[in-house]
Amino acid sequence: MLKSRLLTAFLIGPLILWAIYALPAIYFIAFAFVLVSVGAWEWSAFITEKLSTRVIFSAVNILLFAAIFISDNSDINLLIIMASLLWWIVSIPLLLSFPFSKDNVIHTKFVTAVIGTVLLLATFVAMVTIRQDRDYGSAYILYLILLIWFADSGAYFAGRALGKNKLLPTVSPGKTWEGVIGALVVTTIVSVVALNLLQIPSSQSLLFIVVTLITVIYSVIGDLSESMFKRMANIKDSGHIIPGHGGVLDRIDSMMSGFPIFFAGLWLMEKFG
């Protein structure tokens, strides 16, 4: 499994880097559009096994992604980001109380559909907005993706070497507190190195590191949240499109929380940094 994961990462990694740096803005948007559209199809499996319903959910989401791009309304985009941030706050007590009773509102198809739509929309909005911002652009997209990759790697190896205390065994039995600490240690180093590379003003250095660490913590929560929905739907992997990694959602679950949180952190740096 590890060899398959590494081989896939080796093959896909350069493609992602190329998409971030080499693609003109419109093609990057298309890349992000395809990514979240596939994510919508995979999320539909959390709602139902019925093919017609899955197709309708995916089609509605694709239309919403297109409408958001065409309208390019900053107020609507901000509302979408804020709605996703609300979910990431609510998700913490849900994760801590999982598994919960079948009559919990989170089990309803409508609520699951709304949550998926909001999270995918927020991911799309945050990716495109950061990429198109002249003050951030490709470098910050690359930083966030590498940050999450480093966090995943730090968690994986620290968890394997030192992991004894389970994080949330009812949600994701393989994750440990030691793995989370490993992720935070590695990404703290990454953030310090990035201060110069991204030319972060010294007055904002501490805030940037804090934003980075909060983003990493929420990337773990994003991973756990997807695991929670998979368990509710009795699904092992969201898909099988990526060998050794499962589906697209299994790869972007951390980004679904990481991008909106990072976006909000950059906004706070502008306002209060």
Image: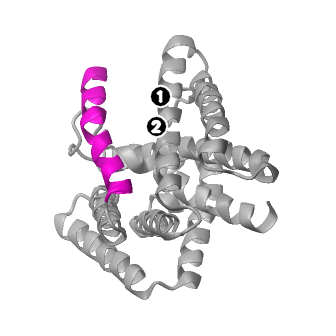
- Relative vertical location of residue 193 with respect to residue 53 in this rendering, above or below: above
Magenta residues span 1-22
Under mark 2, the amino acid is: Trp
Secondary structure of the residue carrying numbered label 1: helix
Q: Which mark is residue 145?
A: none
Front residue of 248 and 111? 248
Res 108 quadrant in image: bottom left
Q: Is residue 147 left or right of residue 206?
A: left
**Disc 1 designates what residue?**
153
Residue 236 x/y as whole percent: 31, 38
Q: Is residue 228 a member of the stretch shown in magenta? A: no
Secondary structure of the residue carrying numbered label 2: helix
Front residue of 271 and 113? 271
Under mark 1, the amino acid is: Ser
* Residue found 27% across the figure and 47% down from its top: 15
Residue 42 x/y as whole percent: 29, 56
* Residue found 39% across the figure and 65% down from its top: 109
- Relative vertical location of residue 192 with respect to residue 202 in this rendering, above or below: above
> Quadrant location of the C terminus?
bottom right
**Disc 2 designates what residue?**
149
